[in-house]
Amino acid sequence: MIIVVDERKLVTDGYSALFAREGISATGLSSADFDDWVETAPKSEMSAVEAILLGDCKDRIELPKKIRAHCDAPVLAVTENNSLEQTLALFQAGIDDVLRKPIHVREILARVAAIRRRMGGEIRKSDAAVVLGPISVFNDGRDPKINGVDFVLPRRERRILEYLVANHGRRVNKTQIFNAIYGVFDTDVEENVVESHISKLRKKLKAKLGTDVIDSKRFLGYSLNID
């Protein structure tokens, strides 16, 4: 899930729609609503945040410090001018990347993926993909690959696979997956839909790999069993 913070509803709605076309859950908030949410959101919601995009919002320079107190997701700023002073101030405030409009959402996703790769972890990283054993995921709207061959999936199943790969080595529960794929503010979809998506994904992975690589434990959640 990506959080877009901007005072203009037209902007937040626009970004949410564009990210949705790429299969990415996004929620737009004003700075006041974001401030309330980030102070009170439970860890299960915070863990589902993949990135925070700061547009035209109040106290943008102060927000990174507040975000870091609750969440380690990449924070990116989108600007409408090419001011060196502003760019330097944003980086100094703790922004991970500064993006100049116009910018395609796929480039935003690629930059988010690059930042997350730089954060480290045990998963092998290539220039364009996060690689776990025979599985390569891209986090920018492209289908994953298995042993170098395209592994075409519906967007929800693709997003779940990306989330499981990103969290390799730890177990994630149904609520965390739901929040990451659908967004914490989506009240029109039942959380149990995750079980259906994972069941379909599990069968496809087993057919392709010859073994069941999604481990599930009741009450504990799911993890990928790939060395």
Image: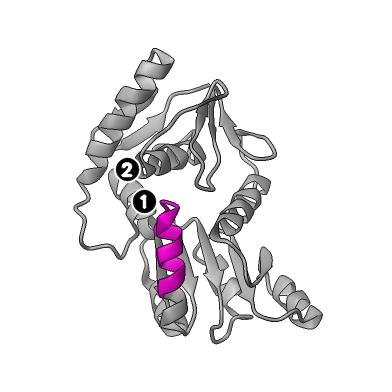
Q: In which quarter of the image is residue 79?
A: bottom right
| Left or right for 168, reference 148 | left
What kind of colouring is applied to the model shown? one colour
Quick check: 28 above or below 177? below
How busy is the neighbourhood of tag 2: few (under 14 within 10 Å), some, or many (20 plus)?
some
Looking at this view, name the residue that lies furthest to the bottom. Answer: 58
| Residue at point 39%, 80% (across, down) | 33
> Residue under circle 1?
181
Give how far across and how far down residue 105 sits, in percent: 54, 60
Most foreground residue, 209 or 120: 209
| Residue at point 57%, 85% (across, down) | 59
Give how far across and how far down residue 206 sits, in percent: 36, 19
Which of labels 1 and 2 is toward the front? Answer: 1
Three-letter residue code for mark 2: Asn
> Residue under circle 2?
173
Is disc 1 in contact with disc 2, using a CB cutoff of under 8 Å? no
Give how far across and how far down residue 14 sits, in percent: 44, 72
| Left or right for 215, reference 79 | left
Q: Is mark 2 on a helix, strand or loop?
A: loop
Q: Is residue 20 magenta?
A: yes
- Magenta range is 13-25
